[in-house]
Amino acid sequence: MINGEKKVDRPIRWAMVGGGRGSQIGYIHRSAALRDHHFQLVAGAFDINPERGKDFGMNLHVTPERCYLDFQQMFEEEAKREDGIEAVSIATPNGTHYEICKAALNADLHVVSEKPLCFTFEEAKELENLAKKKNRVVGITYGYSGHQMIEQARQMIANGELGDIRIINMQFAHGFHSDPVEMNNPSTKWRVDPKFAGPSYVLGDLGTHPLFLSEIMIPELKINKLLCTRQSFVKSRAPLEDNAYTIMEYDNGAVGTVWSSCVNAGSMHGQKIRVIGSKASVEWWDEQPNQLRLEIQGKPVQILERGMGYLYPEALQDDRIGAGHPEGLFEAWSNLYSRFAVAMEAADQGKELNDMWYPGIEAGVEGVRWVENCVRSADKGAVWVDYQ
């Protein structure tokens, strides 16, 4: 991938809903999608304020007539064009994802959605069934999974280098919301309002990220039951939590934990995953994403570096620059958007994808399912519940 040559026959005509001026996540979406020329931004409904959205879109070189009032107008008008959009990314508050995704699928569009996909498992399954019926790709932006060392860990585990998997420790615990910052920060305010954020805050916003990393690294593991306890240390956030612990038991006897928190005072990001086997352990920390820590019982610790020839070929295929140069979040997201593009083109051409994973509709469904089970356990008094 270092040379950035094309993976699709032509750029996919692409639009955004949300992600307008001042949106950090919108900028990440555009930077990732446009980097490899797999997508071309041709339309958008960027803002709830139409004039502001139009001005912003024009500053992205989108023609004025393709800067729309809302997503409904955009889907309707673009369907009339021979050069209409083929895919859309959803970068809006959580409570809108289900409606926009459903409308996009009914308009025969591919979708890239921020998580959560929706609020309930029932809604998630409805979207999954609709995507399959329409033969459309739905990508979920679990952006950290695009880091190459996640793929290295996946291959090491699959090849038995860790032995039998026993324990998975996960966390996403930063400290930036230790105080009620939402009082003066609109982008945080909606995240702690159940009307817009849904049934959880940090479980859905943070905890699902390392959970998906575990699903990529160890895809055969399935949760049997879990126990969750959650707290609102900033009391005004109740009933939504700003801290939660989840314990899980898997079908092979392994156990796992997820610490989800935004009140880990002093922590910059705090996302880590450690997979422990009978022979060795691996650990990845997103603040040092180009390294994977390997600890083999009875041997010195090894730090595996991104881009080096001793890694598995699958971990090298997404390299964008030689070893020693640090890659980061934008590269990881670009790797995912590249995969989304290949999957979308394959769907359009009726081709089967072989051995290529990406965070698709199933990942979105599983994230919603996990949060729903965590909330159910916590609301019953932090009790064990069967995974439903």
Image: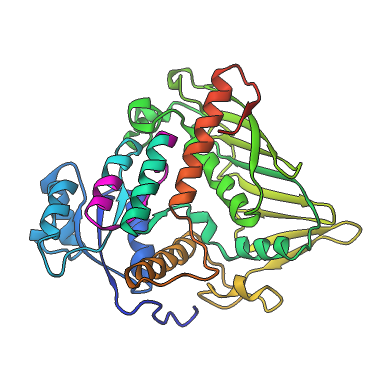
Depth check: give the residue in front, 183 or 203.
203
Depth check: give the residue in front, 131 or 200.
131
Please give left or right for residue 210 compared with residue 90 in the image: right
Residue ID at (51%, 40%): 206
Residue ID at (61%, 75%): 323
The answer to which image quadrant residue 313 occupies is bottom right
Q: Residue 129, how many percent across, how many down?
A: 38, 48
Q: Residue 301, how many percent across, how many down?
A: 82, 60
Question: Height in image: 18 above or below 236?
Answer: below
Depth check: give the residue in front, 1 or 291.
1
Q: How many marks?
A: 0
Residue 62 showing in the rendered view: yes
**Residue 261 belongs to magenta span:** no
Please give left or right for residue 169 compared with residue 244 in the image: right
Question: Height in image: 12 above or below 249?
Answer: below
Image quarter hosting the C terminus: top right
Please give left or right for residue 78 compared with residue 30 in the image: left
Question: Height in image: 1 above or below 247?
Answer: below
Residue ID at (79%, 58%): 162
Q: Residue 196, how many percent across, how many down?
A: 33, 31
Color style of the picture: rainbow
Farthest left residue?
A: 65
Farthest right residue?
A: 298
Depth check: give the residue in front, 207 or 31.
207
Residue 286 showing in the rendered view: no
Question: Bounds of the magenta span?
Answer: 101-121
**Residue 112 belongs to magenta span:** yes
Q: Residue 7, how many percent across, how many down?
A: 41, 77
